[in-house]
């Protein structure tokens, strides 16, 4: 092992449905090391620890030198999707016991959705819901004091019903959390050891249903997420004493261990957020500020939009039919990945792909792990896009014969050749992913032709060129480590926390000074988590978000600003920007007065020192990187292609399509009529030939 104890390392870990990706950064030099190991769905921490052992052993690095581990996790997401969360009890204000049942009267599935809609069981069932006799008004004034004795009696009745987590959400608690804090103290005395989430801590914002649902989800996933993080941290401590574990939040920031365990609802989109933050770093290094991100893994594909170097965000996070009021990067997910299974329904005889996936176990047939069902990966192998000579993760064999055997039954059912069938599978999955890209671009008022497309994930570079053709987004950017870019995002993101407050005022009813005063208070609250990590004020940055709507409307938009900008432009500048945002999204602005709804302060720690690799300069000739000749099937015909070793490419090299570029963590396909050029920091920029 490396005995240079002056070195310290920062590790990014992203757990996907098929692979766990790791990126290790030398904090002194900025040099990076990457590794990929199979995920372990039954216990994700096993795959993480296997990956740490592999990356340290391969590079002769002592794991005790790892000082920080940044981790993107899907534990919270999967807990909601699989319905395996805690048995949750709920305390509401008297008269609001049915708040989750009534919800917003929304039935998914269009006009006829109500015919077949079966409502999901409540995460906090009615039999575990009790009411507190209390009342606080919208301004925070106590109307009816809390009836402590009655509450204790009702909690005693719930005590023996196997409750694993408790939630408290009282009406108007966003304006005054005093009663919720009292209720929490009574619960802790009545039910020792049961974790309690109160809405005034989790989300002190108005709208009782959204606040209740969000706080209940926090309780629902809390025991499982808390246990997972605790176990992982304990194991890491044994390998690297004193290591600091941080978990990626849905909004692209990092949360410390205690914050992540207490507020796991902020982690629901933790996994996908890592890829977007990694793409932001790539954008910063390579000079591209407007990007569509395309992250294709083994199970699903995540897409997002970055404008002027900043990822688009939203105030709601949706997982299945559960929607919570928690900030997240605006990532849209479609069930299309390398492991997506192709099939031909008996009734329609029409080819379908996904959303069912072969996952990590048994995986695609070509992985030689016992899988037999035809997948997107198998189709790529049959078409020659994923050569048999490739080795995923450096040591996983690809078997073309097994891939062909898996695809053949589909070809027989369709009456097509095996190559035509495989290309049909690829075309369908590409269209599915194009639909997701439309959601974050065209349907948000953005023209995808104004953006570059960055393809990453284990399967992204195989499909990115084709997605570039569909969207018209050029160049298509393949970053240096596309298969581990999510881990790159985990490793390079910053500690982050926020504090918010509902503040409903028409613009003429308040002033810039009053708004700034409240934002200063919220900033002090948000800074507590960073102070706990010993990050000084001078190393923190502060941004504000003001939620604004037209008076009389329910829809609101978040307008970003800073202290300096707010002082310079005043709240009138915020009103002007709100009108501009409304026009972009809906093509018009109303001649109506704007109204503030919520104020929010967002605090971030310092950026991580990671240098972008500077490749040696060369000319257009990339022949030194050619490994062998091959043949691929594209657009209904066979084409001769060359296979390249990415690690032998240097800046300035041009690769004429059709071509295949292999590396440890992924394989890149350049289609006929396109050329890839290597830039100074190692990106491959693919553009159509003029």
Image (cartoon, rainbow, N blue to C red):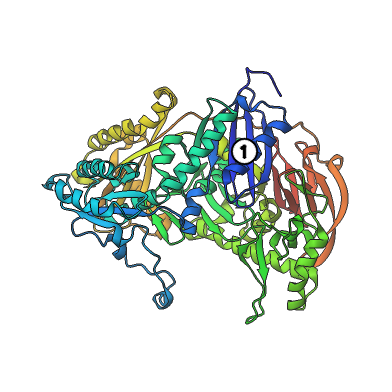
Q: Residue furthest front?
A: 160
Write the residue at 42% across / 57% down: 585
Write the residue at 32% across / 44% down: 196
Percent x, y of residue 158: 27, 54
- Where, by quadrant of the figure, is residue 423 drawn? bottom right
Q: Quadrant of the C terminus?
A: bottom right
Depth check: give the residue in front, 299 or 305. 299
| 177 relative to 563 in the view: left or right | left
Q: How many marks?
A: 1
Q: Residue furthest right?
A: 629
| 592 relative to 232 in the view: left or right | left
Residue 167 appears in the rendering: yes
Depth check: give the residue in front, 244 or 41. 41
Percent x, y of residue 539: 44, 25
Depth check: give the residue in front, 268 or 234. 234
| 514 relative to 539 in the view: left or right | left
In the rendered image, which residue does mark 1 sit on? Answer: 49
């Amino acid at each position: 092992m490396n005995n240079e104890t002056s070195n310290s390392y920062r590790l990014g870990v992203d757990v996907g449905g098929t692979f766990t990706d790791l990126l290790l950064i030398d904090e002194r030099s900025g040099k990076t090391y990457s590794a990929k190991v199979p995920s372990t769905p039954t216990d994700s921490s096993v795959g993480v620890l296997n990956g740490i052992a592999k990356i340290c052993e391969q590079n002769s690095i002592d794991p005790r030198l790892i000082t920080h581990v940044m981790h993107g996790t899907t534990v919270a997401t999967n807990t909601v999707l699989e319905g395996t969360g805690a048995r949750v009890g709920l305390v509401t204000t008297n008269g609001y016991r049915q708040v989750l049942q009534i919800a917003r009267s929304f039935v998914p599935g269009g006009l006829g959705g109500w015919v077949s809609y079966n409502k999901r069981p409540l995460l906090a069932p009615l039999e575990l819901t009790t009411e507190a006799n209390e009342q606080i008004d919208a301004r925070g004034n106590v109307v009816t004091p809390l009836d402590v004795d009655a509450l204790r009696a009702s909690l005693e009745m719930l005590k023996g019903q196997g409750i694993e987590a408790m939630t408290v959400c009282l009406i108007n608690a966003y304006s005054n959390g005093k009663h919720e804090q009292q209720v929490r103290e009574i619960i802790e005395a009545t039910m020792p050891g049961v974790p309690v989430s109160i809405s005034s801590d989790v989300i002190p914002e108005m709208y009782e249903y959204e606040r209740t649902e969000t706080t209940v989800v926090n309780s629902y996933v809390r025991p499982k997420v808390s246990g997972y993080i605790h176990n992982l941290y304990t194991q890491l401590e044994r390998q690297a004493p004193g290591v600091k574990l941080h978990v990626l939040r849905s909004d692209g920031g990092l949360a410390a261990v205690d914050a992540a365990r207490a507020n796991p609802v902020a982690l629901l989109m933790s996994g996908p957020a890592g890829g977007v933050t990694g793409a932001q770093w790539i954008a910063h290094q390579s000079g591209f500020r407007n990007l569509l991100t395309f992250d294709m893994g083994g199970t699903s594909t995540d897409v997002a939009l970055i404008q002027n170097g900043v990822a688009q965000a939203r105030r709601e996070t949706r997982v299945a039919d559960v929607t919570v009021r928690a900030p997240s990067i605006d990532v849209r997910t479609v069930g299309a990945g390398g492991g997506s299974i192709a099939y031909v329904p008996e009734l329609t005889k029409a080819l379908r792909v996904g959303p069912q996936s072969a996952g990590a176990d048994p995986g695609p047939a070509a992985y030689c792990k016992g899988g037999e069902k035809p997948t997107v990966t198998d189709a790529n192998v049959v078409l020659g896009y994923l050569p048999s000579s490739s080795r995923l993760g450096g040591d996983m064999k690809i078997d073309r014969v097994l891939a062909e055997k898996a695809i053949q039954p589909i070809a027989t059912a369709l009456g097509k050749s095996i190559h035509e069938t495989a290309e049909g599978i690829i075309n369908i999955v590409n269209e599915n992913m194009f639909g997701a890209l439309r959601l974050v671009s065209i349907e948000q008022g953005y023209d995808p032709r104004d953006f570059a497309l960055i393809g990453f994930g284990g399967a992204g570079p195989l499909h990115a060129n084709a997605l570039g053709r569909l969207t018209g987004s050029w160049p298509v950017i393949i970053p240096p480590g596309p298969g581990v870019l999510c881990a790159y995002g985990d490793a390079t993101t910053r500690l982050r926390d926020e504090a918010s407050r509902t503040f409903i005022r028409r613009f003429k009813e308040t002033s810039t000074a009053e708004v700034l005063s409240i934002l200063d208070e919220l900033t002090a609250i948000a800074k507590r988590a960073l102070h706990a990590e010993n990050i000084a004020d001078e190393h923190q940055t502060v941004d504000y978000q003001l939620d604004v709507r037209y008076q009389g409307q329910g829809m609101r938009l978040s307008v970003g600003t800073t202290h300096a900008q707010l002082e310079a432009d005043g709240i009138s500048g915020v009103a002007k920007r709100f009108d501009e945002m409304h026009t972009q999204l809906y093509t018009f602005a109303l001649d109506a007065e704007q109204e503030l709804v919520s104020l929010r302060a967002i605090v971030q720690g310092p950026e991580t020192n990671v240098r972008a690799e500077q490749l040696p300069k060369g000319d257009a000739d990339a022949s030194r990187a050619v490994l062998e000749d091959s043949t691929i099937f594209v657009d209904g015909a066979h084409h001769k292609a060359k296979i390249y070793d990415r690690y032998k490419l240097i800046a300035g090299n041009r690769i004429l399509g059709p071509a295949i570029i292999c590396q440890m963590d992924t394989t890149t396909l350049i289609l006929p009529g396109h050329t890839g050029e290597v830039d100074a920091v190692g990106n491959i920029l693919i553009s159509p030939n003029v």
